[in-house]
Each structure stands twice: as structure tokens, then as C-alpha cells.
Amino acid sequence: AEPPAYAAPPSPTPPDVIAAALDTLEERFGVLRSSASGQYEKKTAVVDLGCGDARWLVAACARDPGCVGVGVDVDGAALERAKRRVEAAGFQERIRLREADAFGDDVVNLGDFDVVVAYLFRAGCRRLEAKLERELRADSVVVCVGFALPTWAPAVDRRVAGLPLRIYERSPPPPGRCGGGPAAAASLASSPPGSSRSREPPASAHQDDQEAAQGDCTAL
């Protein structure tokens, strides 16, 4: 059987990129506060689309005791690594992992989360933007590593460890359009265990994406 084709790179996000993103989320957006701040007025729900070994979710939960997370990935082997990492950190009650296509019907509603994390190829970013337009709340933020969302303007646009890092805020929806649902924190306990690199066209279709992801990815 052919190996699955993914919307995300198989390579994990470097720790320096995760640390820089978490610092920026706390300092600029006031979410995922470190334990040093001692401020936990509400839980922060994070979803990682294509979570791989769950390093983003574990880092966020280690930083903020009020954080809960959901990881989605189609790669079962990656999810086994994620499960071991979550268990080693002792976060089984705070992080749920799902083996599924993040863009599939009824897999995940982005309106349930305060922070959305994605490390996707260009085609995946197009699908993500459409899903964000339908579901994301106005008070949530989106972290993208690698390629940019096609039409959204980032609030933060920088390069860390050779990779583009962008953070987006949702603009107020046009009149007549509804935002997303409530934060996922209250319902996380009932979520089935499971993390999602979403299925895409054959891997050869992403050869240019894989090469370009190492360079400047502002042009789409």
C-alpha cells in the first residue's frame, strides 16, 4: 500500500520555535501564561492540527497549569510517540489525542479552542483558512509555522530557527455571520483519546511545498 500523503511536514517543530511562540502568546496576547505569572483566571484550550509527537501540547501544558489540549493526526505511529510523551509528562488528564483527518467532518470544531496550532503545507493552509473562516471565534489566535494563510494578515511575522512563525488574530466576522462555539475546556474530559496530519493529494504534489517551507514562505 502507498504511504499516506500529508498536509503537514513529517519533521517536528524545533523547540526554539515552540518556545518563541509560547513567549509571544503570553506577552502579546495574554494566553498560556507561565507558572511564574500565577494568573489562571480560566482554562486555555489548545488544538494542534497534525500534532505529531504532541510536543506543542506538552510544552503548552508544562508552561500553563490551566492549559488543556487536543491533538489530531492521521499518523498512528506519530500518535504512539505522542502518547508516550504525554504519559511521561503526566498530562493524560489534560491532553487528548485523536487519530483522524483534522479536516474531516465532525472531527474538531476550531470554535472550541483559544489557540490553534498548525504546521502545514500550502494546500493545507488553504483548507485551514476556510475552516477558520467557518469556525474560529473572534477572541482566538492561530499559530502557523512554515506557510502563511492565503489571505489573512498576521499580527506577528518573524523567523525562528530558520522557519517562518506567524500568529494570527481573527477579525470580527461580517454582519450576519456567526462565530464559533464555547471553549473546549469544559468538555475535554468527555473527548475520546486520540492527534492529525490531514490527508491530501499524493506526496509528489507537495514536493515544491517541502522545498519552499525551508525558505521565505510569504508568497502564496
Image: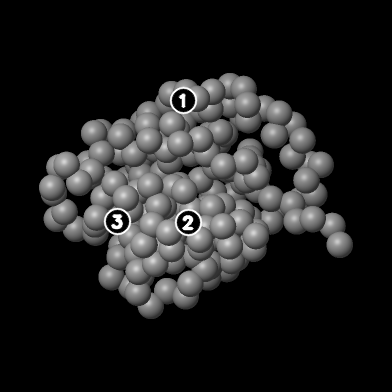
User: Which tag is nearer the camera, tag 2 or tag 1?
Assistant: 2
Residue identifier under label 1: 160
State the colouring used for the structure image: one colour
Q: Is residue 101 above or below residue 214?
A: below
- Three-letter residue code for mark 3: Cys
Marks 1 and 3 in Cβ contact (< 8 Å): no
Disc 3 element? strand
Q: Residues within 10 Å of mark 2 (few under 14, many from 20)?
A: some
Q: Position of residue 51 (x, y in %)?
A: 53, 53
Rendered-image quadrant of the C terminus: top right
Residue drawn at (71%, 29%) of the image: 211
Q: Is residue 33 above or below residue 84?
A: above
Residue identifier under label 2: 85
Q: Image quadrant of residue 74?
A: bottom right
User: Which tag is nearer the camera, tag 3 or tag 2?
Assistant: 2
Rendered-image quadrant of the N terminus: bottom right
